[in-house]
Image: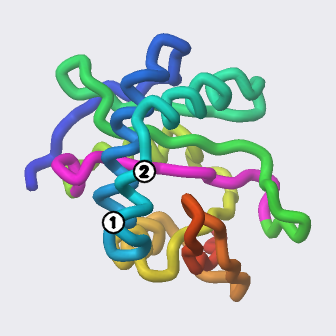
Amino acid sequence: METQSAIVRPVRDVDAEALGRVHATCWHETYDHLVSEATLANLSPRRMAELWTHWINQGEDFVQYAALVDGEIVGFAGAGPSRDEDAPRPRELYFIYLLHAYHGTGIGQQLFDAACGSEPVSLWVAEDNPRAHGFYRRNGFIPDGASQDEPFLGETIHEVRLVR
């Protein structure tokens, strides 16, 4: 896929509804092989928009960026202080999602660079997500040996921690 340029900017209050839609779609595209169809069917863009309304107002230690193509949000990323008790790095990449249609365009890298820069960070990623692992490897991440079972919409996803 050819490189595509997006406008990457901080998330705004008015983005919550669009972010909810994109977030729900990204979860369908990312986790369809990890959780049941019934669980994903219960995923509501409206509920995700409500979560975004809460996340947007977390304070200045938390950063969230949206990627826009032709004025429409196609992806997002967020980072902040590490949530782990045994935090291997002071900051954590909480999430980065990009609509499947924009994978391989360089937009994911733009989002990652906005949220993390060159800082040392950690993150949790589904163990069975080869595309994400490849992306993180290219950005200098390695597993640190930690893993956890993370509740996800009433099911569980096995995650591993990566550090840079």
* Residue reaching furthest to the top: 14
Q: Is residue 108 visible?
A: no
Provide the residue span drawn in magenta: 89-103
* Magenta run includes residue 95: yes
**Between residues 92 and 46, which one lies in front from this camera angle?**
46
Task: Quickly name the residue at label 1.
Answer: 37
* Residue reaching furthest to the bottom: 145
* Residue reaching furthest to the left: 1
Look at the picture and state if 28 lies above or below 148: above
Q: Is residue 9 left or right of residue 91?
A: left
- Residue 93, position as x, y percentages in the image: 62, 53
Helix or strand or loop: what does disc 1 sit on? helix
Task: Quickly name the residue at label 2.
Answer: 42
* Magenta run includes residue 113: no
Quadrant for the N terminus in the image = bottom left
Look at the picture and state if 100 lies above or below 138: above
Q: Is residue 93 visible?
A: yes
* Residue reaching furthest to the right: 85
Quadrant for the C terminus in the image = bottom right
- Residue 16, position as x, y percentages in the image: 48, 22
- Residue 117, position as x, y percentages in the image: 56, 45
- Residue 48, position as x, y percentages in the image: 50, 36
Q: Are marks 1 and 2 in contact (CB under 8 Å)?
A: no
Q: Quadrant of residue 53?
A: top right
